[in-house]
Amino acid sequence: MQKSLPHDLRPREEQKAAVKNDGVKRRTLSFYKYVQIADPEALRIELLERWGALGCLGRIYVAQEGINAQMNVPVHNWDQFDAYMKTKPEFRDVPYKIAVEEGEAPSFYKLTIKVRPKIVADGLDDSSFDVTDTGEYLTAEEMNAYIDDPEAVVIDMRNSYESEVGHFENAITPEVETFREELKYVPEKLRIHKNKKIALYCTGGIRCEKASAWLKHNGFKNVRHLKGGIIDYKHQVERKHLPNKFKGKNFVFDERLGERIGDEVISHCHLCKVNKSDTHHHCALAACHALFIGCDECVEKRNGYCSFRCQTLDKLPESLKKRYARFITRHRRKNFKKTPLKK
């Protein structure tokens, strides 16, 4: 069983209130690295102590194969954080992906570090193929060229609820709910493109590292992937004054739930199905907690609930709500977009 430190045990609501009111300016970032870690549990404890002392918050996964971090760091402690990273040989050269925008609320409210079998749940047997035989990187300029090339194929390696609110022009966006599903779907359904130029992209690049090696193993001849993902793409196009070919918003897995990349709003409210919106919300009924896109009008009308049914259930005694919790979770959370409950 993994050990916990005191600062890692505070209730969520207490942690949220403390962070909201502390007045600390924070910098949101993500990074990953596939690198051999001899003792992930020892590293987890060390990171909890060191990053906790600096006031860092976030969700970090550590495994023998590396680290995958999404976090924020108090700006006044940034230099200390960076100096510590440089003392670790395995992380010394890791590139940070700094968030495009911070938003009104902090990206994370507590520090959670977990040891996992893998830093990304992909369902692959890594011993069955060469995971180091990854595709070459694409710069933002090269990515734009692929998007404009009719002989190239651009594939979104994210989930469908991510691509729904934002994606690159002309990209193939598979209707999948997990990365595991996508790794099975793409080689099977897109085999007709295996001899074409392939460009993969994801949020920060980590999913494409493994995906590019997997596609090459499955016979795709020319696979490359966007370095730094959508996050770094945005920084590159601004720095180099390039055309921005990403439409809409980039979904992120923190409290912000998204950051603006393109000016367009390309999705619609799941509740009224009329108004344009790309703002995600979690249902106010804790037992449901479904992720849905809602326009301001509908969210206000339903008081933050994803359906009138959830709004009604939340008025029941706790004992009855618990009885419905498992049913709601099973039938609502995954497929809200495809099979919403009726009013």
Image (cartoon, helix red, strand yellow):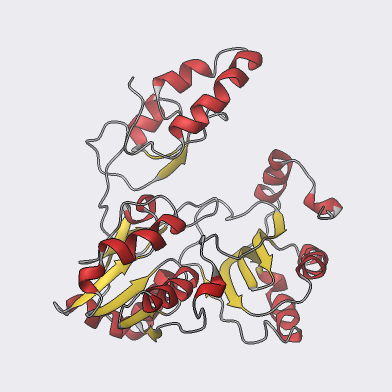
Q: Is residue 46 above or below residue 112?
A: below
The residue at the point 56 percent across, 77 percent down is 96
Residue 32 quadrant: bottom right
Q: Is residue 105 above or below residue 66?
A: above
Q: Position of residue 47 (x, y in %)?
A: 77, 68
Q: Position of residue 117 (x, y in %)?
A: 65, 62
The residue at the point 73 percent across, 83 percent down is 83
Q: Is residue 17 left or right of residue 231?
A: right
Q: Is residue 162 above or below residue 262?
A: above
Q: Is residue 48 left or right of residue 218?
A: right
Q: Is residue 128 left or right of residue 137?
A: right
Q: Is residue 222 left or right of residue 31?
A: left
Q: Is residue 262 visible?
A: no
Q: Is residue 212 visible?
A: yes
Q: Front-most of 76 and 214?
A: 214
Q: Front-most of 215 and 237?
A: 215
Residue 228 quadrant: bottom left
Quarter of the image with the C terminus is top left
Q: Front-most of 73 and 88?
A: 88
Residue placed farthest to the front in the image? 128
Q: Position of residue 118 (x, y in %)?
A: 61, 65
The residue at the point 57 percent across, 12 percent down is 316
Residue 172 quadrant: bottom left
The residue at the point 45 percent across, 28 percent down is 305
Q: Position of residue 192 (x, y in %)?
A: 20, 70
